[in-house]
Image: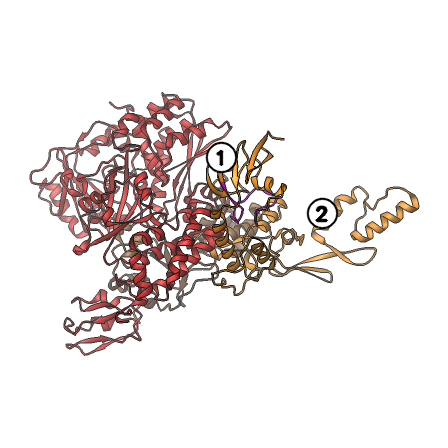
Chain colours: A red, B orange, C brown
Amino acid sequence: MRVFTDSRIEKAERELLAADKPRISVGLATCGISVGGDRVFEEFKRLIEEKGYDVSLKKTGCIGFCKEEPLVNVKLPGKAILVLHRVTPEDVPEILQKVESGDDSFNKVLFQIDVWDHKTVPPISYGQPYEGIKRWQEIDFFKYQEKLVLRNAGIIDPESIEEYLAVGGYRALAKALNMSPEEVIEEVKISGLRGRGGAGFPTGLKWEFTRKEKSDKKYVICNADEGDPGAYMNRNEMESDPHSLIEGMIIGAYAVGADEGIIYVRAEYPLAVERLQRAVEEAREWGFLGKNILGSDFSFDIKIVKGAGAFVCGEETALIASIEGRIGRPRPRPPFPAQRGLWGKPTNINNVETWMNIPLIILKGGEWFKQFGSESNSGTKVFSLVGKVNNVGLVEVELGTPLSRIVFDIGKGAPGGKKIKAVQTGGPSGGCIPEWLFDTPVDYVNLAKLGSIMGSGGIVVMDEDTCMVDTARYFLDFTVDESCGKCVPCREGLKRMLDILDDITKGRGKKEDISLLKELASTVKVTSLCGLGQTAPNPVITTLKYFEDEYIEHVVRKRCPAKVCVELIEYEIDEEACTGCGMCARRCPVSAITGEIGKSFSIDKDKCIKCGTCLDVCKFNAVKKVSRGLEDG
Amino acid sequence: MGRRVKVTIDGKVFSAEEGESLLAVALRNGIDIPHLCYEECLEPYGSCRLCIVEVVEGFKKGITTSCTLGCVDGLKVLTNTPEIEKHRKVLFELYLAQAPNSEKLKKLAEKFGVYSTRFKEKNLKNDPLNGKCVMCGLCVRVCNDVLGVGAINFIGRGYRATVNVPYFEESDVCKGCKACVEVCPVDAIDYSDVGDKRVMISWSNTKVDLIKCSVCGRYFSPLPVFGSVSKKLSEYGVVCDVCPDCRKRLIAKNMTSSGGYNSYA
Amino acid sequence: MDFKVVDEIIDKYKDPSGRILGILEDIQDTYNYLPKEVMVYVSKKLNVPLSSLYSVATFYSFFNLEPVGEHLISVCMGTACHVKGAPELLESLKHLLGIDVNEVTDDGKFVLTTTDRKFSLSSARCFGCCSMAPVIRIDDRIYGYVKIKDLPAILKEYGWKEK
């Protein structure tokens, strides 16, 4: 079965299966680390060394169930993987004792994995399932998911090329090198794969453009400048399974005829950079990168370039300018990067997730890939499901899955039983989709019909406490800040739109502002130079389309129905509920709260800066936000 | 020369070179399309967006900028549809609010029927360009891409972006050639020749020495520009520390007296 | 100023792709900002106009032209963090740190530093930890699910003292 025979791979395989000794792996993507996963890992390491336990301790990426992190996989020889959730350093001694003594009655078990399909090899049986513990597919969060891109995330050690090889890694590359470049491109075309960066351009076609250009030098680039605020799938993909990305790029380079690859990754992702760097070095050591790859006459290498904080560099021509050491100002296309790209040479740019689909398509075939997804939207998409939703996390579903499935079946609705109002897909370039349209299948075509876009795959859930005008203002604030400043509609037009939204959220809006906003939105959309400006009005256009009543409330009655817009609300203490503990008064940064301990407290509205501290610290729900609008007038 | 193709602008057929900018073809044939960032000596840049046209037959239909639109055979565009006028009006209004002090901009806007703006004037405190710059980028591109001097560049991004010398401090690379002044479509860049110095007022008062005419004593050319040119010419025995006016006079005099061409070329 | 470190950084970047950004990033790692004399030095050494380096330094939000405090606190302003109360966190941090200004510097970058230069406060565009929203980052550590009431305890880890 194995293409590569090597004792190191056999060892990795035995380790993955915990054939010789128990294996503990801690979910250490940035998300896991930020809630203490690193401390858990350190504690395991310390105790294992101190007590001399015969346990192999590994890192792993993120399986996507971010809400339950830190996650720890515990695997005893011959048994299924147990996934423990919300593990703290204090849990570590007990876990280790049980592992050591073979006692499998662990606390905090969330689910088990007995069989896992890495797709690149036949499903691997990890061990005997435990009784009375749910299998991962039985958990609602995973039930509706189809893991193609995240096929290895949260299972293998992302810092070990051997483990990647043990689950079928680089087999697609070996296969591709035995095909002609044209055959590789044909397979990608058959698969129907569309660019996962946002616009959804057919990948095979894009490759063909670059292939057909005659040039002494060509480049492939991985666009890992995931700048959409609220989307983090690319970060996780790189941190959890960097070799899938690298393998995809090597295959792509072979297909288009490039000998140099660049991964342009944003500076805000230091861990991704570190893991990619390591993975590139490993791949080089193993002969998957460098001269005469796997004995063929194809040579290719990859370098990593860190961005420096500019959302616009997700745009292809700006990204190229940035790599060349210039400011990220997009230029008009044509010429497309396929014709004139990096340093003037033909260049093929794809997003992280696009590249990660490639090994699967080559290994299993384009027809196989097409079984997933819907008509002309084949495959899956990883979404970062965040905001006011219970099960936040990374969700990979087939394209065409209805939003309601993602938000309600997988996401389990909003916390606190609140009513969900809308989702924003596609970040600042996308639009909001109201709850009454949640039966819409999520794919490139249908989202566009609603005025939104797929974008990179962010889904931010908004509940009744979210103000849609504030949301539009938020996105505009973002794009105004991130506009490169080259063309006037984006540079000046967006700022004018933001000014109007500022006025509206502060109670200074006028009725004619709404029509001016619409007019500006249309001009910015039609006349901007690049995708950033052309899509930046979408959040405004869609909120106006679906929630114009909220705008009118702000403008006419100077009220914010969701009680978000600071200038339109006040904080009050409910005397009935107040126990007089005085916590709010102690923590108020401007000493606006006075009262008597044991009795009740009140807020001086002139002093109050509406920072929300009192609301946050009150244990008795006595602090309330109230509208100060023109209720009676 | 590339292949000749036929393009149709507002129903009239014109001959053009394949790939050349449609805006160039239109301007050459007297079709007035407003533009700020287009300059023949530079590659189309597409930043001012005023030259939008509607493609009705071509590679990609819809509204696009004509400066960046390459001519292909059979290309058909309209320059004055109601939709274009609508968007162009908004763009002009944005410019008028951004650069309220540029008379040249006002005239251009008026020519296309826009006399006022619905937007508040941009907050222009401490603007070295006095509320005249439209950020077309021509000065930056001429200074960097044509002359290779690189004295000025864009600073910052988005609506806060501006053009100036680094750190807003007197430049030691500016040659005072004032190509930036010449190319500016809205007269935003100020300079002044005072005595033996040229002061680039807009560029943080960068000062450059001027050279004196050996005949009339007038200061006429910035030394850094002149220096390199005169050095080259002196290798051919050409004397050129003479201002253009005096040079003409000297040439005329020499021609009448000796009847020949002389070293005052 | 000793430019040996700068020479070493420049020597590390031979390939033109990503060279300028890489050099500036490493310089900022070394000095915690981009000192002007280093920028002038790099400009001469690479034969790149200073205007163009300055343009890059002011375009990308990662670069600081002024020194920042000992600890850099960034409040994530990503969408998920925004809907989960990041603006309130930022306000609260301003008060806790005694930074009571609400303006940005000339180049539009928002970094506020305490008078004792112990802390700098800035906002950031998404660390990709949206599932833990709201999040803040102090130096290299990311804190998830941050509540206003947790802030004093977090700040104390970095030597902050309650007034």
Provide the chain ID for the residue under circle 2.
B
Q: Is residue B169 visible?
A: yes
The quarter of the picture where residue A143 lies is: top left
Position in image of residue A148 (x %, y %): 26, 34
- Circle nearer the N terminus (1, 2): 1
Q: Is residue A511 above or below residue A486?
A: below
Chain label for disc 1: B
Q: Is residue A26 left or right of residue B152?
A: left
Location of the N terminus of chain B (image quadrant): top right
The residue that mark 1 highlights is: B58
Residue B152 vs residue A286, the one in the foreground: B152
Q: Check disc 2 and give the amino acid type.
A: Ser
Query: Taking A335 as reference, is C141 left or right?
Result: left
Q: Is residue B38 magenta?
A: yes
Residue A194: give x, y in percent of width and height. Answer: 34, 34
- Residue A289 appears in the picture as rendered: no
Say which residue label 2 marks: B228
User: Given the current orientation, which residue lies at the most extreme left position?
Assistant: A132
Q: How many marks?
A: 2
Magenta highlight on residue A85: no
Residue that extends furthest to the bottom in the rendered view of this protein: A596
Q: Whole-percent x and y of residue A417? A: 16, 55
Mark 2 and mark 1 in contact (Cβ < 8 Å)?
Answer: no
Question: Is residue A625 found left or right of B218 in the rendered image?
Answer: left
What span is in magenta? B33-54
Magenta highlight: main SS: loop
